[in-house]
Image (tube, rainbow, N blue to C red):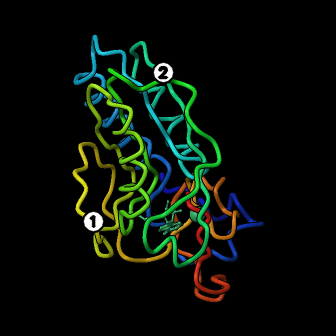
Amino acid sequence: MQVDWLARYPDLAPAIREVILAPDVIQNRIAELGVAITRDYRDRDPVFIGVLKGVLFFMADLLRQVPLPLEVDFLAVSNYSKESRDQGLVRLMKDLDVPLTGRHVIFVEDVIDTGLTLNYLLRILRSQHPASLEVCVLFNKARHRLIDIPIKYKGFDLPDRFVVGYGLDHREKYRNLPFVGLLKPEAILEAPEDNGD
Ligand code: IMP
Ligand code: MG
């Protein structure tokens, strides 16, 4: 049965042009990623690291598809300015509680665009000498990539369009949509301000 997802979110739907990934499509793919990670990390006590806030929903759904003993921790970052963002410089607002030395680490991201932020954060994690470090990204926008980062687990390739939902925001709104949608041009106020997540 075709669900009219926009009809279920009447207060947010007027800004959405089109649903491009329905909730069941997202969840099915996450279940597949969970199977792959479970297979690869049995007996390795993995640590999952995410960056707040965009990864909130993905992390919660992914971890429930990985029935292993595991730990989870979060970083919070903020960008100093547009210029520093362009250099991939971010300020850590919350550091990790779990020491990563000797641990098998999976860095979980909602979306990777240029790769600058992710590259910077991976350098920070590597400096703690984890036993292994792999990347798991739900949404990949390859067109803007400036830095080639090996992605071990990937959910979806997305077109080079600004999308919201399932954790992704426009000015902090729309994260709670269970689907991914394209914003109408008139709902994009200006160049999306980046809050580093
Ligand atoms: P980059 O890979 O360093 O360019 O940074 C990616 C960050 O930009 C993500 O963590 C998001 O905060 C933001 N971002 C990129 N594309 C989108 C989008 O389509 N919707 C919402 N946020 C996005
Ligand atoms: Mg954002």
> Which circle marks residue 135 in the picture?
none
| Residue type (three-letter) at the residue carrying disc 1 | Ile
* Spot occupied by residue 34 in the image (x, y as percentages of width and height): 35, 31
Residues packed near mark 2 inside 10 Å, few (<14), some (14 to 19) or many (20 plus): few
Q: Which residue is mark 1?
A: 147
Q: Is residue 174 left or right of residue 23?
A: right
Residue 190 lies, in percent from the top left, at: 63, 87
Q: Secondary structure at mark 1?
A: loop
76, above or below 63, in the image: below
Direction from residue 116 to residue 172 in the image, left or right: right
Q: Is residue 183 above or below residue 78?
A: below
> Picture coordinates of residue 180 (x, y %)?
51, 61
In the rendered structure, the answer to whether residue 33 lies left or right of residue 27 reads left
Residue at 59% x, 59% y is 5
Mark 2 within 8 Å of ligand 1, using the beta carbon: no
Q: Estimate the x, y position of residue 73 in percent, counting from the top left.
A: 54, 31
Residue placed under numbered mark 2 in the picture: 71
Closer to the camera in the image, 20 or 190: 190
Disc 1: residue Cβ within 8 A of ligand 1's nearest atom: no
Residue sticking out furthest to the front: 127
Determine the residue positioned at 63% across, 42% down: 94
Q: Nearer the viewer, residue 37 or 104?
A: 104
Q: Quadrant of residue 88?
A: bottom left
Identify which residue is drawn at 29% across, 71% down: 146
Q: Is residue 22 above or below residue 194?
A: above
- Tell me the quarter of the picture where residue 113 sits: bottom left
Q: CA distance from mark 2 to mark 1?
A: 28 Å
Q: Secondary structure at mark 2?
A: strand
In primary-sequence order, the first of circles 2 and 1 is: 2
State the image quarter where residue 134 is shown: top left
